[in-house]
Image (cartoon, grey):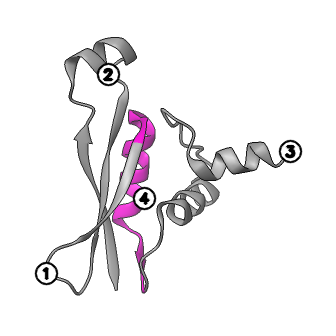
Amino acid sequence: MLRYSTNWMGPINSDWIQKNGNHWAGGRIDVYGSEEYPDEIGLPIMHVEDYGKFSEWLDSFTSIAMWTLEELVLLFEKQTKIHIRWFHTPYWEEEDANSN
């Protein structure tokens, strides 16, 4: 069984924070399973409140096979009714907007 956990990595650049505010968080998702070291999924910058809620949700999520970021986010948003506020629109939301 695979377990998921966020690993905060920023933003930590003071110039970036001064320009964009300190209400953002990003980093990676560590996926723990049978390997000695976790697999990693890049986690783009999102609003810090959403990062916290997504992190809590991931702490209780497990899967047999490794899920993609898109799959994790879509299930999170469906189950919690929380739409993550991204610093930049993720590719899967851009595709939805372009198909209209």
Q: How far is disc 2 from disc 1 in space, using C-alphas?
A: 34 Å
Q: How far is disc 1 from disc 4 in space, using C-alphas?
A: 24 Å
Q: How far is disc 4 from disc 2 in space, using C-alphas?
A: 22 Å
Task: Give the left or right position of residue 45, taking residue 95 as reference.
Answer: left
The amino acid type, in three-letter code, at marker 4 is Trp
Q: Tell me, yes or no, whether the two marked residues, 2 and 3, touch with CB atoms within 8 Å.
A: no
* Residue 11 in which image quadrant: top left
User: In the rendering, which numbered label is found on residue 57?
Assistant: 4
Q: Which residue is drawn at 48% across and 67% down?
A: 68
In front: 86, or 83?
Answer: 86
Task: Give the left or right position of residue 40, taking residue 100 as reference.
Answer: left
Please, which residue is most extreme toward the top here?
18
Q: Quadrant of the N terminus?
A: bottom left
Residue 63 rendering spot, x and y as whole percentages? 43, 80
Region rendered in magenta = 45-64
* Residue 78 in which image quadrant: bottom right
Q: How far is disc 3 from disc 4 in space, using C-alphas?
A: 31 Å
Q: Which of marks 2 and 3 is in front?
A: 3
Q: Which of marks 2 and 1 is in front?
A: 1
Mark 4, secondary structure of its residue? helix
Q: Name the residue under label 3.
A: 100
Q: Name the residue under label 1.
A: 36
Precedes in sequence: disc 2 or disc 1: 2
